[in-house]
Every structure is written in structure tokens, then in C-alpha cells.
Image (spheres, helix red, strand yellow):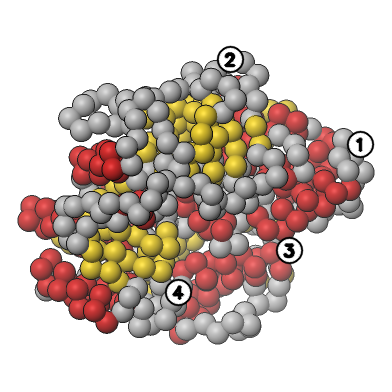
Amino acid sequence: MDLPALTFSEDQAEAWDRVSAMLRDAGVDLDEGLCLPAKEGKGQVMALMGKAGSGKTLLLSELCKALDAAGAEIVTGDYESRKRKEKRNFAVLAPTNKAASVLRLRGVPATTIHRILYTPVYDPEYERIAEWLMGNDEKPEIEALTEEALDRAFAAYQAHKSVPAALAAAGLRGSDFITGWKRREEPLDIGFVDEASMLDDRQFEDLQEIFPNLVLFGDPAQLAPVNQSGKMVFDGVKDSQKLELHRIHRQEADNPILDLAHALADPALEFQDFERMVEDKARQDDRVVWGQRVEVDLMARSPVLVWRNATRIRLINAFRAVHDAPETELLPGEPLICDGIELPLKHRKKRLDLEARGLIKGAQVIYLGPGRKPGFSRLHVMGAPDPQVSAASIVKIEKPDEEEPFIPFAARMGATFLHGAAVTIHKAQGSQWEAVQVFAPDLFVAARMGRMEAGQPLWKRLAYVAITRASERLHWVVRNRLARPTGPLRIDDLKAPAAPLELEQEEPGLI
């Protein structure tokens, strides 16, 4: 077997062999780099499981590269070549936009399960650009675009493998190049699903109808979907179709964050024992911090992770109070979390414009100030290549002991936001930040309650998910206190393009 140039561990090599054998049965030979025409047959499902740092994303990335080298075409959901039927194809999917964006930042061209059900119809002129970007045609000459604009589109596509994002880099909007949408009528071919622990049974069934060859990647130690009673789709897959990765790859094996996450697998470990372990790690390594209070400065860029919704709301209001934020408006520099886009179906093109700019559900956003039109906000989308955008916004700030959120301002429709200074661990699943604060008093309450999920104490699952959201530094906060800020909220540290994109309204109140 010809493995990629990088060195796989034994369990990764075994997983590569298992997936290769499955694809070979389907007519795709990764070893020889050959794709034979698809043939009718019984569907195949495989589950590759592993905890944080076990190398799942690396394996997924290398499988994508091998399929591309063999001539299979990637299907991303934002553009589908008419020539797809002539080739074998594959798609990388995630249950949420946020989880898909994390993969895209790592160079894996992922899309969402929902997006794969509908495909956009492109204007023929701009379809020529898409085919060129995908390597199917020669570089076109487009009267409306300069050579420099096409070059920007090409560079953007090489970085993100997204046709709409590439066309946005050339100065176009979805309404310029998309004429409509159609529901997928024919199945696809090979499907890789990341964060499969978040799938529910209905999504799993839909995926099996679309993909005759399906590989699930997931972490069995994470939190199950709320409507699954603690069960994951892995539980319904035969043992012969499962493989678990064990070795830690993402960071050095002595990384204290991963050490703590993996220590939670010990069934004899109690909450107080785990906290002593965290305290010991903090004395040994500055990548773990034993926090006596929530650091308010960190909250502006990285939310505090909590279990209870009441804790989240209380921390958000404390954050705003310590910065003397008025109730009737937001301060520049306040963090927000996109909670979705409220637009009618006829405005799917505008939704695509926003998503191409990174404004997706779960995206972390910094408020920069009011837009030029009522109900508009100027926003900085964290992690986006062109981060600054002005869009119609509906901002909701929840209050303790009040059922209805306070809305400082709102458009009739647009992107909806919750405050982002704190977020529940369930909502954080699929996300990652360099530095993460975990609010330990909430996990202590979960431990005291003795709740179980899928045979494991709930506090351990919560702690595992929260800890593994940190890529560089973990702050384990043990006191219900908030530090004073070292200065006012700031936005001068945020990358700004020469001209922020203004998503103009076509109708009152719309993006």
C-alpha cells in the first residue's frame, strides 16, 4: 500500500487501509489513483472514531487529497459542475455551518448536510468562471471583470475551494451569478461526515439515501444530540464497520490540555480528583491556568464556556455591566455569536452572500458600530478572509429572570445575533479557540446532580467537550467572580480591508 508522504501511526494506517478497501469495492482505487465508473450495489457505511488529538482530521484531509489525485470531483454544495456525471465524486460534510467552517480553515473543503440537499443554478457566463476555477475549462474572458478581479477569484478559490467566496473576492454578489435553486434529485457518490457525534437518526438516514459510500468521523466522548437520549449514530453501526483511533497526533503527546481530556476516561475519577489534577497541571505548565475569577478581557474574543443557560446570561450581563455598556445600545468591541439568518426563501442569494463572507450560524463576530442605514450593523467576522461587513442585524440580549430578550435595535429581517461573551458547552461543540475559559462551578453542579449520559457522568462529557475547545491555553475558572477589565473594549486590533463590504438593501429591512 502506498501511504501519503507523511508518516501515519499504526491505527491511522489501518484506518487508511480499511477506507481504501471500502472505496476499492466501490470502484475507486486510491493506491493506483484510478476511478472506475460507479456500479449498482449495496450501500457501505464505516465509522472512524477517536478522541481529540487522535488524528481524525489529518486522515480526512489526506483521503480528500488522494481522491482528488485519483480524479474524483469534490462537491461543495455552492457550485456543481455539469461535468460531475462524467466523474466519480465525493463530499465532505458537517452537521453545522460552524463545524464545516472549522474544517475549511484547516484546508478541508467542507459543506453542511443541509446545503447538499439544494444546489444553486448559475448564470451561464459566470458558470464559465466556476468551471475554470475547478480546473475544467480555460480561463474565460468576462466583460464585467478585469484580469485582476479574475486573479483575485483564483487566489481565493485556491485558499478556500469555494466558488461563491472566490466570486465575492472578485467583487460579485450572489444576485449577480445565481439565477435560482433546485432540490437535489440524484444521489451523490462518496460522503465523509465530520463531527458525526452530532448527527441524529433522521440526518443519518438522509445521508445514507444520498451517499452509497459513507464514512463517519467522530468523537464518541462528546455530547450526543439533545433529541437522541444520549445515543449516537455510532451505536447503530455494526462493530465490523467501526474502527477507533487512539494515538494522540494533533499536539505533542505531553500536551497538558489533551492529558486532562483523556484522563476523564478513567471511570474511577471523581470531580474533586479531576480538579486537583487541573491544579497540578497549572503549576507545571502555563498552558493550563487555575483561575480564581473569569478574565473579562478574554471574554471579548473568546467566550466563557458554561453548562447552564442561566449562568451564560448572568455572565453576559456582568460583562456588559463592568464595561458600563448602556442597555439601549451596543458598544464597539462587544462580541456576538451569529444565531442564524432570518430571510425568506426568495432571498437565498443574499444568504449565500453572507455565508460566503463567513457570516454563518455559530460564527463569532465583533460589533464595530451602527451601519449607515437603520437596523444595519458594521461587523468583523472572526476568521474570515475579508472580515468586515455591514448587514441588517437583529441583536438579542437576554436578561436574568426575563423570558423575552432585550433587543437594542433590529432590522425586520437579517442576521440574528446573541451576545458572545459566554456560550453553553453544547453550542460550543464543533468550535475551537486558542484560549478557552471553562466555568467549573457549573460542572460541579452537574457532578453533584449525578446525571448520566450514555453510561458516563454528564460532567465528564461536558468537561471533555469544553477542554478540547482550547487549542493553546485552558483557563479552569473555580470562583464565581469577574475580574475588572484592564481597559475599554477595543477594535483597533482587528484586521480591516481597504473598503468593507456593504450589503445593500433591495427592500426595506432586508439585507
Q: Which residue is mark 2?
A: 508
Tell me which numbered mark, 3 or 1, is placed earlier along the sequence: 3
The residue that label 1 is drawn on is 143
Residue topped by disc 3? 71
Q: Nearer the viewer, mark 4 or mark 2?
A: 2
The total of numbered circles placed on residues is: 4
The amino acid type of the residue labelled 4 equals Arg
Mark 2 / mark 3, whichever is N-terminal: 3
Q: CA distance from mark 1 to mark 4?
A: 47 Å
Query: Who comes first in sequence, dot 2 or dot 1?
Result: 1
Sort mark 2 into few (<14), some (14-19) or many (20+) by Cα contacts within 10 Å: few
Q: Secondary structure at mark 3?
A: loop
Q: Inspect this view and state whether residue 451 appears.
A: no
The amino acid type found where label 3 is placed reads: Gly
Residue drawn at 45 percent across, 74 percent down: 250
* Left-right relation of 123 to 209: right
Q: Earlier in the sequence, mark 4 or mark 2?
A: 4
Question: Which residue corresponds to the image point at 49% horizontal and 28% vertical from the top-left?
Answer: 393
Q: Secondary structure at mark 2?
A: loop
Q: What residue is at 91 percent from the left and 36 percent from the top?
A: 143
Compute the Cα span from label 3 to label 1. 32 Å
Residue 250 has which mark?
4
